[in-house]
Image (spheres, rainbow, N blue to C red):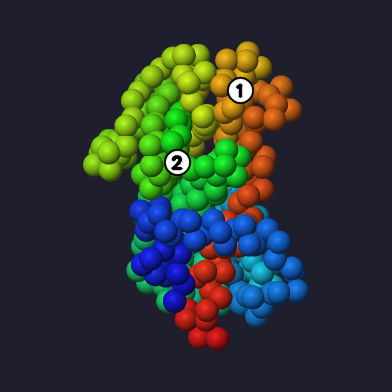
């Protein structure tokens, strides 16, 4: 049985599955994966299926790179919404039952919140949630917190500003939940009025005793935080173009914003970006978003290895 926490887990569905020892163990494993020789091949002979009903560059390719670096193989559908039998009306549950016969683990991204949980209910092999609508994106949050640790040398006593679309942005939602496992963290939500952080996440933070506040004034926030986590306004989740237009373009990090940012802070973004971070910012050493994306390979190697290497889910 894979062990990513003090309580073993079989699937990666949401960040709520983790406790503090679990993330510390996973981050140590990700560090180990950085230097793992390709010849080690701990997952040789195993097959990962990547089933993406929504577009992706980073998540799909980094999961596939991770599996290949571990000596495993991949089968993939990058546009399952159109090019799998979903277009003929097949349910997620039936698709998962079928792919169980083809692969030892399944990474799924789906446009419906809760789809990964539904997949896990019928799956005999590990399911890894690569994003379920506006729900969660747990491997992203794990790589985000891992990146904070690498960049700042700590994951505690952080002042974190989450910027942008906090209503539909699943990466911000998952990261806020994961930060409950840190000590002394304070959160600031900077979002357009149409897309505030959800009441469900606020309730969880309040219950965990994590201080948070809303502040629409990004200029005032920038000098006083350690981490700025920018996000894209999720055009694909809005009911109408008018609603999207009312939310987009309100918070842009440009060279002027970087002058206000605390010199010891970092700027993160799960990517892709549209216009919320200008390219002029990329050369600033505090711009951590490309390093952040590269860290995804090591976190995903650690996750796959934890779920598959001991053979309990594959019968090896
Ligand atoms: N961060 C992220 O989920 O990127 P992709 O949509 O490219 O996978």
Query: 230 or 180, which is in the foreground?
Result: 180
**Location of mark 2 (residue):** 156
Q: Image quadrant of residue 284? A: top right
Q: Residue 237: in sight, yes or no?
A: no
Is 286 placed above or below 249 here?
below
State which tag comes first along the sequence, 2 or 1.
2
Q: Identify which residue is drawn at 70% across, 66% down.
A: 36
Could you tell me residue 74's position as x and y percent? 64, 69
Could you tell me residue 262's position as x and y percent? 56, 21
**Location of mark 1 (residue):** 263
State the mark number for residue 165: none
Q: Quadrant of the C terminus?
A: bottom right
Labels 2 & 1 near each other (Cβ < 8 A)? no
Could you tell me residue 132's position as x and y percent? 43, 51
Is 231 placed above or below 177 here?
above
- Determine the CA span between mark 2 and mark 1: 19 Å
Query: 236 or 216, which is in the foreground?
Result: 216
Q: Identify which residue is drawn at 38% across, 48% down.
A: 181
Is 234 placed above or below 68 here?
above
């Amino acid at each position: 049985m894979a062990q990513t926490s003090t309580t073993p887990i079989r699937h990666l569905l949401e960040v709520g599955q983790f406790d503090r020892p679990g993330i510390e163990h996973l981050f140590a494993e990700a560090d180990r994966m950085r230097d793992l020789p390709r010849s080690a091949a701990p997952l040789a002979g195993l097959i990962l299926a990547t089933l993406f009903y929504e577009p992706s560059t980073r998540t799909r390719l980094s999961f596939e790179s991770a599996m290949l670096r571990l000596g495993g193989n991949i089968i993939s559908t990058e546009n399952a919404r159109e090019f799998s039998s979903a277009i003929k009306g097949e349910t997620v549950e039936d698709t998962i039952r079928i792919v169980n016969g083809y692969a030892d683990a399944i990474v799924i991204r789906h446009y419906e919140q809760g789809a990964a949980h539904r997949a896990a209910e019928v799956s005999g092999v590990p399911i890894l949630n690569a994003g379920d609508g506006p729900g969660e994106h747990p491997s992203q949050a794990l790589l985000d917190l891992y990146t904070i640790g690498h960049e700042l040398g700590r994951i505690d006593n952080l002042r974190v500003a989450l910027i942008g679309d906090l209503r539909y942005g699943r990466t911000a939602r998952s990261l806020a939940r994961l930060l409950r496992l840190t000590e002394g963290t304070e959160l600031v939500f900077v979002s357009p009025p149409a897309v505030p952080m959800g009441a469900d996440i606020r309730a969880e933070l309040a219950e965990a005793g994590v201080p948070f506040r809303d502040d629409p004034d990004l200029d005032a926030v920038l000098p006083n935080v350690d981490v700025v986590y920018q996000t894209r306004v999720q055009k694909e989740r809005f009911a109408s173009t008018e609603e999207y237009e009312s939310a987009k373009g309100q918070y842009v990090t440009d060279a002027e914003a970087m002058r206000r940012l605390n010199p010891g802070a970092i700027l993160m973004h799960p990517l892709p970006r549209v216009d919320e971070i200008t390219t002029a910012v990329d050369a600033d050493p505090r711009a951590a978003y490309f390093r952040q994306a590269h860290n995804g390979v090591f976190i995903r190697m650690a996750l796959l290895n934890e779920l598959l290497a001991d053979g309990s889910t594959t019968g090896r």
